[in-house]
């Protein structure tokens, strides 16, 4: 899956439901994201790329690199409800 295939509204709502800091897999495990996109091995990388591309429009920012639960992200701006 490519980062172009994510439903922006679904991912935005999942990010807004996350705590201030979260991992890529937390978003992938969100019920709405799972329902909209299912799961395959390409999703974590594609979602990380998607979140990086969308940081200007709805946050978050990357805090560290990949671990087995995915990248650590922090909500900023609109993603925090600001």
Image: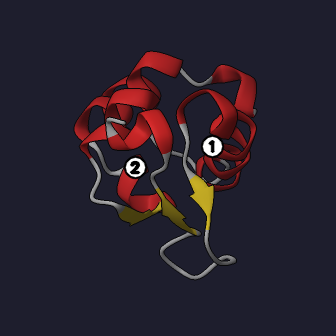
Q: Position of residue 44 (x, y in %)?
A: 60, 55
Q: Residues within 10 Å of mark 1 (few under 14, many from 20)?
A: many
Q: Position of residue 42 (x, y in %)?
A: 67, 49
Residue at numbered disc 1: 51
Q: Residues within 10 Å of mark 2 (few under 14, many from 20)?
A: many
The label on residue 23 is none
* Pointer 1 with pointer 2, Cβ within 8 A: yes
- Check the picture and name the quadrant holding the N terminus: top right
Kind of element beneath mark 1 = helix
Q: Is residue 14 left or right of residue 24?
A: left
Q: CA distance from mark 1 to mark 2?
A: 10 Å
The label on residue 27 is 2
| Nearest the eye: 58 or 37 | 58
| Nearest the eye: 80 or 25 | 80
Can the viewer see residue 47? yes
Q: Is residue 63 above or below residue 77?
A: below
**Residue drawn at (45%, 31%), measured in percent from left and top?**
11
Res. 15 image quadrant: top left
Q: Is residue 81 above or below residue 40?
A: above
Kind of element beneath mark 2 = helix
Q: Is residue 44 left or right of residue 21?
A: right
Q: Is residue 63 above or below residue 28?
A: below
| Nearest the eye: 68 or 59 | 59
**Residue drawn at (24%, 38%), measured in percent from left and top?**
31
Mark 1 vs mark 2: in front: 1
Can the viewer see residue 1? no
**Residue drawn at (40%, 64%), measured in percent from left and top?**
22
**Residue drawn at (49%, 49%), measured in percent from left and top?**
76
- Check the picture and name the quadrant holding the C terminus: top left
Q: Position of residue 13 (x, y in %)?
A: 33, 29
Task: Compare marks 1 and 2 and give the one earlier in the sequence.
Answer: 2
Q: Position of residue 68 (x, y in %)?
A: 54, 80
């Amino acid at each position: 899956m490519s980062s172009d295939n994510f439903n922006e509204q679904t991912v935005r709502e999942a990010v807004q439901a996350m705590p201030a800091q979260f991992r890529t897999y937390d978003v992938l495990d969100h019920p709405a994201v799972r329902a909209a996109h299912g799961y395959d091995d390409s999703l974590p990388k594609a979602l990380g790329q998607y979140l990086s591309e969308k940081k200007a429009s709805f946050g978050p920012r990357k805090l560290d690199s990949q671990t087995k639960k995915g990248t650590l992200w922090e909500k900023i701006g609109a993603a925090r409800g600001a």
